[in-house]
Image (tube, rainbow, N blue to C red):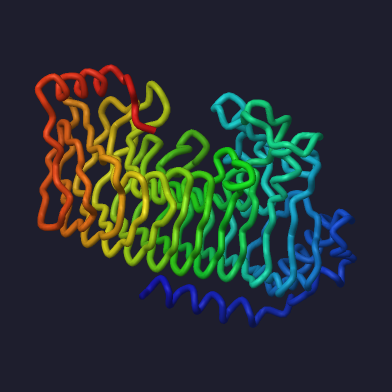
Amino acid sequence: MKLFASLLSLLIATSAFAGNVSVKDFGAKGDGVSLDTKAVQAAIDCAAGQGGGVVSVPAGTYVCGSIWLKSNIELHLDCGAVIKGSPDIKDYCSADCCPQNEAEPNSGDYVSGGHLLLGVGVQNVTLSGPGRIDGNSDAFLLGPDGKAYSKKKNVPARPSQMVWFVDSQDIRIKDLELADAPYWSCFILNCERVWIDGCYVHTRRKDYHTFNGDGLDIDRSKYVSISNCRIDTSDDCITLRASGAHLLADPKDCAWVTVSACNLSSSCNGIRIGVGEGRIHDAVFSNITISDTKTAFNIVGAYEKNGRGTDIDGILIKDIRVDSKELIRIHHMHSKACTIKDITFDSISGSAPETSHIWAREAAPFKGIVLRNIDVPTQFECVNAEVKVEGGSMSEKALSADEAAERRNNIENSKHLLY
């Protein structure tokens, strides 16, 4: 309640500023052809210079490169208003635009470090709809022949996260459509007090596949609320991470996160928790529908080789309706030592016919995994994990001695890893 009260106070305060302007007043065309970056940026700078205010974006399509958000600003997109990413990678910020940013050409993701909207060290910023922020993925993921690139390493260039906040506080994103990012849609890194409500987030997954097309990525951030969102993505819908410490002066835990009343659908994971080298704790996911999804819940220590992985504890997942291939996947993957404990799944129903996996390394067994009232007629494999089943139809799959030995060998030697 304190979080919501502070955000309400923020909105009231922002609306009282004198710097309310329209991007049209600064020469923005909104014709879908002209490059409107300078005009939109000038409107934001003007409002910020007057102490803050609302920057209105009327109906139209505003082609833009990188736009720097400023403190005490609400960027409001009217009905029919679209901020669309420029098709020219040169119109985006460089990877060295700030110490917290980087390109990732060697990580396997092949992104430039450019962002469409970015807030670095800002406070009291609102992005509001009902308009749309459009990453223009066609411009980067389709070749000259109009066909999608078959591998991401073949993409000549693409921006990084479409909407990016880092080292910022009191951020609100509401009633917006975040569409067709060529990479992750929205990245919240090392922030505090963030509220995302009523948004529709989607990346391409039917006509072509957006490589790494995540929805909302919450990394090393505290006091985050995500509610009433519809997310349909080619990769993870919602992630909690504890990564990027090498870029941050004061890296935080990822903690005190609530996700509620959301509808999720993904070609990969509905909810993924893990990755990095920090700690993720105290998060609640409730009243969520997950449909047409590969894996509903993926909790993983480390995707990267030679990394310790992220410690994860104090996670509650309850009141969920699922239609996925696999329900639960909890695994160390490349991590050798991270701790995963005190994870409770409570009151989940639906369909997930493939076997779930709870696989730990012998040196770091999982503890306190509770499956309570899981009314999904499926089984789970358990290796080196303390799992308590309380009611429901989900049951542990019996492994023969040879099967158990094979699983343990594969886990310890990082063979046949779960992704």
- Residue drawn at (37%, 26%), measured in percent from left and top? 307
At 81% from the left edge and 41% from the top edge, which residue is drawn? Answer: 88
Determine the residue positioned at 50% across, 63% down: 230
Q: Is residue 50 visible?
A: no
- List x then y, in percent, for residue 36: 84, 57
Instruction: Choose between 219 and 211: the one closer to the eye.
Output: 211
- Could you tell me which quadrant the C terminus lies in? top left
Q: Determine the image quadrant of residue 41.
A: bottom right
Q: Is residue 398 visible?
A: yes
Q: Give the quadrant of the N terminus.
A: bottom left
Reply above or below: 337 against 66: above
Could you say which is closer to the camera, residue 339 or residue 198? 198
Up/down of 11 relative to 276, above or below: below
Q: x and y percent of residue 246 in the render? A: 48, 33
For the image, the number of numbered tags is: 0
Which picture quadrant has residue 90? top right
Q: Is residue 316 left or right of residue 35?
A: left
Residue closest to the eye, 126 or 400: 400
Q: Residue at x 48, y 54 (%)?
A: 191
Give coordinates of residue 370: x percent, y percent.
16, 51
Give the x, y percent position of residue 242.
Answer: 40, 42
**Looking at this view, is 223 or 380 the one in front?**
380
Residue 234 versus residue 350 in the image, above or below: above
Side (left or right) of 381 relative to 319: left
In this picture, residue 7 sits left or right of residue 328: right
Query: Against 224, is 237 above or below?
Result: above
